[in-house]
């Protein structure tokens, strides 16, 4: 049976303390599918790249609903760590769906 697992992990704040700081996430993929040459891969992506991916999926999805992304916030509300973890969980759910 073919299996593909994707994980969103290890959020990192880049340019911390700067007005142009952002968070990126490690996206880890593992599969035993013959459709993939590499059985594992790992990249870092920021939220805006998930937005791009969702738009591309919407263009090609037809009548299939594309899952929502977690909300975007120009300013962190509450604990930054809590916000980042909630977003990480939301991005994980997006990729699983």
Image: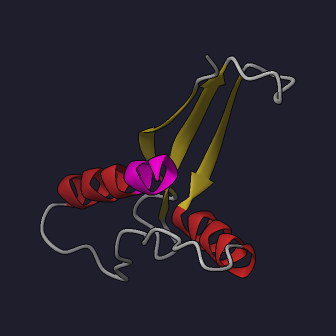
Q: In this view, does 60 lie above or below 22?
A: below
Q: How many labels does the image show?
A: 0
Q: Is residue 62 magenta?
A: no
- Locate residue 82 relative to residue 70 in the image: left or right: left
Front in this rendered view, residue 46 or 64: 64
Quadrant housing residue 17: bottom left
- The residue shown at (15%, 61%) is 79
Front in this rendered view, residue 94 or 65: 65
Q: Is residue 36 above or below residue 66?
A: above
Q: Give the range drawn in magenta.
A: 91-97
Q: Decide whether the magenta segment is chiefly helix, strand or loop.
A: helix
- The residue shown at (36%, 51%) is 88
Instruction: Name the spot of residue 87 as percent of width and height, x first.
Output: 33, 59
Instruction: Name the spot of residue 38 as percent of width and height, x first.
Output: 81, 22
- Locate residue 39 relative to residue 88 in the image: left or right: right
Colour pattern of the rendering: secondary structure
Instruction: Name the spot of residue 42 as percent of width and height, x first.
Output: 66, 31
- Locate residue 34 relative to residue 92 in the image: left or right: right
- The residue shown at (38%, 78%) is 72
Front in this rendered view, residue 47 or 90: 90
Front in this rendered view, residue 83 or 53: 53
> Residue extending furthest right?
37
Quadrant showing the N terminus? top right
Q: In this view, does 2 lie above or below 72?
A: above
Instruction: Name the spot of residue 78 as percent of width and height, x first.
Output: 12, 69
> Residue extending furthest left?
78
- Locate residue 6 relative to residue 44 in the image: left or right: left
- The residue shown at (30%, 80%) is 75
């Amino acid at each position: 049976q073919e299996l593909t697992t994707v994980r969103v992990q290890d959020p990192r704040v880049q340019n911390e303390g700067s007005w142009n700081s952002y968070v990126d996430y490690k996206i880890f993929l593992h599969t035993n599918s013959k459709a993939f040459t590499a059985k594992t891969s790992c990249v870092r992506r920021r939220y805006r790249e998930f937005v791009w991916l969702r738009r591309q999926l919407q263009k090609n999805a037809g009548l299939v609903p594309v899952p929502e992304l977690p909300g975007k916030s120009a300013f962190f509300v509450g604990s930054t760590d809590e916000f980042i973890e909630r977003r990480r969980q939301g991005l994980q759910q997006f990729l699983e769906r």
